Image (cartoon, rainbow, N blue to C red):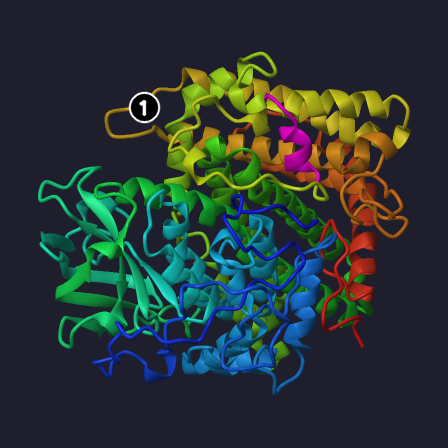
Amino acid sequence: MTVVRGWRTPQRGPAAAGSPPPASASATDPADPADPDPAYSADRAVPDPAPAVPDPVDPAPAAAHSTDPAVPAPAAGWALAERLDALLGDPEDSAGPFGYAAAARQDVAEEFPAAACAALDRIGVQHYYVPARHGGALTGLPQLLELVRTLARRDLTSAVAHGKTFLGAVCVWVAEESPGAARLAGLVRAGELVSLGLTERAHGSDLMAGEVVAEAVPEGYRITGEKWLINNATRGRLVCLLARTAPEGGPRGFSLLLVDKARLPHGTWRPLPKVSTLGIRGADISGIAFDAAPVGRDGLIGREGEGPETVLKALQITRSLCTGLSLGAADHGLRLAYGFAAGRELYGRRMLDLPLVRRTLAECYADLLAAEALSLVAARSIHTLPEELSVTSAVAKYLVPTTVDRVLLRLRGVLGARAFLSDHHAHGRFQKLERDHRIVGIFDGNTMVNLYALTAQFRTLARGFAAPAGSGPARHGAWEAATFSPDRPLPPLRPEALSLLARHGSTLAASLPGSTAVLARAAADDVRLVPAARAARTLGAACRALHTRMGAARLLPGGAPVESFDLARGYSACLAAACALGLWRYGGGAGNAGGAGNAGGGGNGGGGEGRAAPSPLWLHAVLDRLSSGLEEAVPGSTGPLPRPRGVEEEAREPLYERLLERMAAQYAAGELFSLFPCRTAEGPPC
């Protein structure tokens, strides 16, 4: 990734790309009373930064909260992730707040990772939760994908606990009218936590059934009711709250309010007890109850009645970025399993030499690369194809966490009993990792919610796929290069372009035939590309047939039929294949038989300036894994059944053997398991 241009065109005084963001002033806001309630953590209460934004300054010495991020803007590859990982220190350091030992201790004690979150504040990670136009460091959403992935690779609990502030604040960044945006930006940069208050005990994800009421009064609103299972509801100072503002409810009967607990009179709110959870045990999963809590008119986010629409649009962004949690978890699990297999002897030879173990590790590695390709393209498409994010985000949020859940399940088999031990192997990291990751597929819209969102758009998606190339408004211009090329600048995000439905289908999915044709032409001149071209051709034919079935599907009175969910799973594999092909095509592959990053083997990277072109190995493996996923979801879609499995396995054997060699090289070099070069803080194994 390179430096990307602004979230929106900054209005004044933004930080230049690669420069520290402006520092917030430390003056207090005299309108803010002291915290009246001991339930509000006193050590979290800090003065409000003044809204004025001075000129950029050099990073200040470490303090309670940084005024500038120590993490710079990205330059190439996963540069931002690499820099952050180095700042976090060696995870094997038992005394460090980001060490594996500390995470294990906190998990057993169900303790909030306060030291880790404080260290992240000192580094300045919270600056990336604020768009540059509001004085923050965030110039492109792929930056957040990198940061979240890096934190999750260390400890999912810390990543969720700290990163959830972006989830709480993003509705303000998306809303067209938010008078409190400048003040919120200052508070977030100062290290204040922001939670998102959506769910209620009796209604879960059914937002239109919410019972928390915001009664209109002359000075603003009076809030009464309870939100439950809210991350950072107790520790956080601010809550972005969805409340009923019209007695009859409905899509225009709910509004978003930004509630500052430090400004509420004593007795008008109380925290609900922390809920014990299977994973992310230390996270503050609790709730909050309001009793006629007053909020001024300036607390309204957007316009009254626009709450649900703003939430759904904001969730499209966060769902696209949640995949970073899964990418980090997959890298962590693969590193544990590979290291164990390489050092373990069974039956007179290394465990890593057993054919089943080798194939399992190689296929899991390919699954991670497929998830990475989809995640990166989804994050970039927030800028380039916001009109279609309702589809792209649903695919990413369904497919990536589900894939990584299955990866961890398979790796559990490699680790055997050590996958269940909490004390005697690697600080019990794997069993904690597996428990922690299960939540990723649930929050910000669970698997069924995302699959249903796809089924509701089947007819539009089918029409868009069949339309002539370039017929939709999003298909004009240089969107493909901007979306698929990791080193290209991104246009500013246009929140106003976000839509609840992709009216012209998915441009990403529709790119599959064109990229397949480019690959076929390249394969005519390079025999190394022939297997990948064959896999792409099979997927392309299956994708066409799948869209025909999607166009014929009909919603039932009670919702989508079971078959439609299977089609949605298959569609997700097709869109992920289009993302992988696009990365190969625009990452240098079409011109040099290489492609994105360095996961292909040979040389020291490729697809970017100054790096040698790798083989197309990664693309073939990713397409093979996605083809298997499509076949599992929709049997017979990739060819007639039954088929001679022996022939297919004979062709796959050398593919995954070579892929395992590349994985082993990244492990030995102390690099991230990735399409792109990125050194890890722990470095090569001892």
The residues colored magenta run: 476-485
**Between 97 and 257, which is closer to the camera in this rendering?**
257
Which residue in the rendered view is the most extreme toward the bottom? 95
Above or below, 176 against 671 in this view is above
Give the residue furthest to the top: 468
Q: Is residue 260 above or below residue 142?
A: below
Residue 582 horizontal/vertical position (percent): 69, 33
Rendered residue at 42%/32% (across/down) = 454
Quarter of the view holding residue 453: top left
The image shows residue 424 at horizontal and vertical percentages of 60, 82
Rendered view: 213 above or below 280: above
Q: Quadrant of the C terminus?
A: bottom right
Residue drawn at 70 percent across, 43 percent down: 486
Whole-percent x, y for residue 619 in the image:
74, 38
Determine which quarter of the picture holds residue 663: bottom right
Amino acid type assigned to the residue bearing label 1 in the image: Leu
| Tag 1 secondary structure | loop
- Disc 1: which residue: 555
Query: Which of 227 and 384 lies nearest the eye of the viewer?
Result: 384
Whole-percent x, y for residue 603 in the image: 90, 50
Per the image, is 84 magenta? no
